[in-house]
Each structure stands twice: as C-alpha cells, then as structure tokens.
Amino acid sequence: MTEASDDPLSSILRSKREVTRLQILVEIAEHQPAIRQQEIAGKLGVTPQAVSEYIRELVDDGMVAAHGRGRYDVTRTGIEWVLSHAEALESYARHIRRDIIQQVSTWTALAAHDLKEGDEVGVYMQDGFLYAAIGLRSANGVVVIDARKGEDTGVTRLSGIIDHTEGMIHVCKVPRVQRGGSRMVNRDLLRGVTGQSGMVAAVGLEAYVALVKAGRIPDMFFGSREGAIEAAFHGIDCAIFIVDEEFTDFLKRLEGVGLSYTIHDLVTA
C-alpha cells in the first residue's frame, strides 16, 4: 500500500468522516439536482445539520456544485474522488474474497478415494462435481475430515485455480402447438442433439412431448432454464428444447451470463 495520506482505501477505512463524505456524494449523485438533506440524514443515521455541514464542505472542496437552495450536483472532481475510493474498496473486497476468505473457507468435495484429515489434495471439477484427490493439481488444499471414496469431505486452505471448462448449451426451438408443436420436430435430429449432451431440459409441454416421443425423458422440466445454465457453469454440456416464444429471451439470458451456445433447427420441412 502507499502512504495513508495518498491511499484512498487507507483514508476511508481509517476515518468515519471520509466514509460519510463518500456516502453523501453518492446520494447526491443518485438524486441530483434536487437533494433532500433530511432523507440523506435518515438513510445515513446522522442529523440534517451534519449533512448540511458536510455538503457545505464538499462545495468548498470543489466536489459539489450548488445551484440555489437544495439543488446540487457532483462535479468532475467529486466523481473522480468517488471513483478512486470505490475502486479501492472493490479491490479490497476482491482481495478478501479471493485471498482471505478462500483460505479459511471449507469447500465441500467428493473424495476421489479414501482420504484422511490433514491430507494434501488436488481439487478439480468432473461431471459437474468438485472432487478431492491425492496429488498436486492446478488447485490444492488440505482435507479437514476423514472420508471414504465417494463420500463428502471438506477442503480448506485452497490455493490456485480450479481447472474448469464451462459446458456448451445446445438450444433447440420447438413450435407451439398452434404451429404443430411436437409433430413438427424431426426425431432423428433431436436424438442427435441429446446424444451430445450430458443433461437435457425442456421448456413447454410441446418440448417435453417431443423428447418423450423420441424416447428421451428430460432431466429437467420445472425451472429448467436456470437449471441448464447452472449445469453449464459446472462444466456439463446441456441441450434445452424450448418453445419458440421463450426462445429469444433465453438466448438473451445466455448472452447476459456469458455462456457459449449453439442453435439447432429441428423442425421438419
């Protein structure tokens, strides 16, 4: 870290005053230009007089511009000050999550073989599950409880990065019943897609029936959109058969979470 006077993280963590200044600047930025000091006071747990004094100081420091009674906005200087402190806090939070909490947290894993408390193990993902096994891997930790092969065990002092690849989602549109429903789906093409997938999901009865007709009961039906996404995050290739009116929204959801997907046309010509 730099000297306390130069480091925004050090200054804000050491001073309740700086924390309050940051909070007030954020409140002004969120509600500008019409600012109700009493509402800010209630939210922050200070008096309206204290808020008024803080705002006066922020105006004097060039971080807030006043435009008549009760009308303020945050200046470029104020925005830069907020950003520097927010970035420092965000960096500190990442450090806590990644370097501190991970060291003291206990991760639940399946024992790849018999393990004893204190064993040093490698931790890895396989078929959507976290495993612990003797031998070094890209992520390693220490066993906290005896476990036989296949039992749940705890791993702490985790270091490194778990070797993991997200799964692919195969998205297949199925027409609504008004447009033919399951009758329009080519079963051979459907079987080809399910053969590439570790998990199969259906959205809509038309999709469910199309799968059943092809001899495949879906693994997921209720809550299948989020179930398929969760499975893909755990490294499982998934196929989701989804009625056409839900299709576009689901693709937007996949784009939002950053998962890879491919689209299959199963409709019989």
Image (cartoon, rainbow, N blue to C red):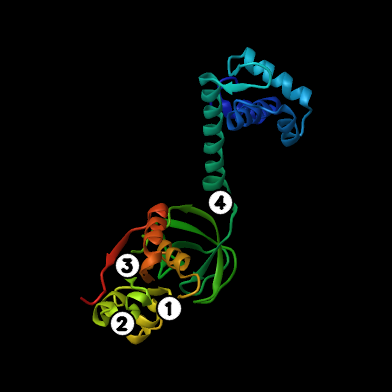
In the picture of the structure, the residue carrying the numbered disc 2 is: 183
Q: Confirm or deny contact between disc 2 and disc 3 (CB under 8 A).
A: no
Q: Confirm or deny contact between disc 4 and disc 1 (CB under 8 A).
A: no
Position of residue 156 in the picture relative to residue 237 (left or right): right
Tell me if mark 2 has few (under 14), some (14-19) or many (20+) residues whose alpha carbon lies within 10 angstroms of its own: some
Residue drawn at the location 33% of the way across and 73% of the way down: 175
The outermost residue toward the left is 269
Which quadrant holds the N terminus?
A: top right
Q: Confirm or deny contact between disc 1 and disc 3 (CB under 8 A).
A: no
Percent across and percent down for residue 90 are 54, 38
> Secondary structure beneath disc 3?
strand
The tag earlier along the polypeptide, 1 or 2, is 2
Q: CA distance from mark 1 to mark 2?
A: 12 Å
Residue drawn at the location 23% of the way across and 77% of the way down: 268
In the picture of the structure, the residue carrying the numbered disc 1 is: 205
Residue drawn at the location 41% of the way across and 73% of the way down: 201
Q: Confirm or deny contact between disc 1 and disc 2 (CB under 8 A).
A: no
